[in-house]
Image (spheres, rainbow, N blue to C red):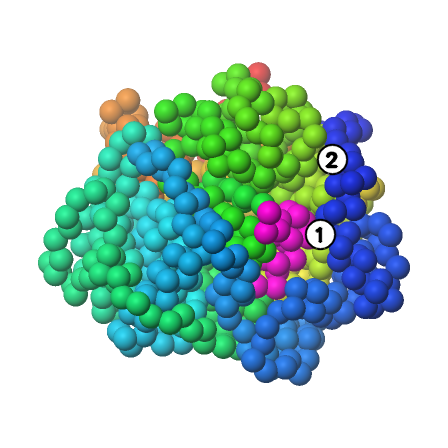
Amino acid sequence: MDEAAVTGAPELLWEPAPERTELANLRRFMRWLREHRGLDLSSYDEVWKWSVEHLEDFWESVWHFYDVRSSTHYREVLTSHRMPGARWFVGSRVNYAEHVFRTAARGQPALMYASERAPLQQMSWEELRRSVAAVAAWLTQLGIREGDTVAAYVPNTPQAVIAFLACASVGAVWSSCSPDFGTRSVVDRFRQIQPKVLFAVDGYVYGGRVVDRLDTVRELEESLSSLQRTVLIPNLDRDVALGELHARSRWEDVVSKEAELRFVAVPFDHPLWVLYSSGTTGLPKPIVHGHGGVTLEELKFLSLHCDLGPSDRFFWFTTTGWVMWNILVSGLLTGAMIILYDGSPGHPNVTALWELAAKARVTFFGTSAAYLMSSKRAGIVPSEFDLQTLRTVGSTGSPLPPEGFRWVYENVKQDLLLASVSGGTDVCTAFVGGCPILPVYSGELQCRCLGVKAEAYGERGNSLTDEVGELVIAEPMPSMPLYFWNDTDGKRYHESYFEMYPGRWRHGDWVRITQRGGAIIYGRSDSTINRYGVRMGTSEIYRAIEDVREVSDGLVVDLEGLGGSSTMLLFVSLQSGVELDTDLADRIKGAIRQHLSPRHVPDRVIAVPDIPRTINGKKLEVPVKRILLGRAIDESVNVDSLANPQSLDYFARLARELSA
């Protein structure tokens, strides 16, 4: 990593007013610690150090501060600090959905929702509870029990929230994909977990374009042999035929019956949902999170770091295929109203989300760094809308560059917490992020989150300060994966995080921990593609282009870079006698769009003489990325390990052209 790129004092952009600091949930927690634990912690840094040096005491305090409900008392907070293998709150029995509904305020909206075609509407807590109870009773009548898997091919709509909470209430395991994912991408995920029920829409609207998905639903039914029933949700305002390939039910019939909402108390580490990380070396990894770990972590993160509570209106632009959807729904745990949006953030223009924020009187506006930078490039001035209620802007998905920080304060609002956060699908939360009682410096994430011993590691496993290193988590967290689905011996889980630094979680980001205790993220240190906040492995892109007969091989690189921009390049080697023309490039992009999603269409397709590989056949994605970012070949890879070292010469020449 070029140290010249990380020097320079950041600009102080914002400091919280004393009254905001005193009213923050974090200050309330600090006062509680003083009263109930005898801890006189006066600064965030003191609270963080205590939280990572006394893990059991910290998490037990979070449990009692938020009055987490358990049908049985836990016998032990933490079995050991060993990773992987640590177990939390052994003996307790909880339910995520129960903790959602205990925040219900009678007569108040639980959520608001809008789409490209429909205006802003709201759903009361009473209606949400009634609908969740109906779907839960239907699942139970169908024979769905604790541990059974339920899949959803749905957009970010109230039906998705209802179906998920119903699954959680009966102890079933939820997993969702956005309908802009193509058939192969969805099958690669759902086939691994063998769902018994599929909730699916007939189509969706994005960017003003209607996309029919009934054929995809049929293909999913054919491909998922475990399915017992499909519930069709009419999203395109039409009558959908039932019973074509599988036993099907209509959504309106499922939610029509009256029932009492019950909650199955499950062990703390009982599976809640399955999320998917990248498929860099194979199929996407199905990551399993538990009821207790998610409940505890989201209460901590959303309340103490995001400062959410019953008076807030919480929005984050996301799809059901991104972890931010799970975090958005978890806003209900704090009593906040959540705001759902189904559609393109740029339709009919880039102001769409800012207009929604004004109409919904959002207090917390979450989005991606890419959207903020798009707004900046488009010359948008969000302060022209009525954002009087807005208190916090959240940014994630990729590093927000310093000019993005400045743009927010110059064009959105001056008195505002800009909470840039970085975490992952892997833990369903942030490692480093925002804090309502700390100042904001340009380009810098404010803090390491409570209970997260995040460090920058050098190559020899030494902890660094004010130097760029690998982001490593040195102590266990309750929301770390329980396991990967079908990874019975834990081998894949171990290789994913603990192989480089045994007993320490290596996340795959470049990070610098500053003297202030803040953090600066410099992009991925591995080859995972991270486009607009949605991660997808390179192997999925390779599978998508397999059917393009003119292509013999490919290599994809996301030049996330130090500046926060993202340029994805797909290099292809072609069959003998084939040239890369506009038609072929368009067909390659079309295959990726069809099988994966529009987000993963490369910015450029470039023909190369040969794809560099190791002697054992592994593609050199990370070394090629390093070369394209300006590092010398011999600093990027051991050329003696390559089957075709001469192939790297092309990328070195291209790097010089890109930097010219």
Q: Where are the magenta residues, as a range? A: 295-311
2 to 427, vertically: above or below: above
Mark 2: few/some/many CA within 10 Å (<14, 14-19, 20+):
many
**Neighbourhood count class around disc 1 (C-alpha, 10 Å): few under 14, some 14–19, many 20 upward:** many
As rendered, which of 26 and 1 lies closer to the eye?
Answer: 26
**Label whose residue precedes the other's in the sequence (1 or 2):** 1
Residue 437 located left or right of residue 212: right
Residue 192 picture location, percent across and down: 35, 64
Residue 47 coordinates in the image, percent (x, y)? 80, 56
**What is the three-letter code of the residue carrying label 1?**
Asn
For label 2, the residue is: 440
Residue at the image point whose x is 42% and y is 58% from the top: 126
Residue 223 figure quarter: bottom left
Q: Which residue is mark 1?
A: 25
In which quadrant is the N terminus drawn? Answer: top right
Q: On the rendered image, what quadrant is the C terminus found in?
A: top right
Compared with residue 582, is residue 196 higher up or lower down, i.e. above or below? below
Residue 113 coordinates in the image, percent (x, y):
41, 43
**Image vertical order of residue 278 relative to residue 265, above or below:** above
| Residue 559 visible, this angle | no
In the image, is residue 116 part of the stretch drawn in magenta? no
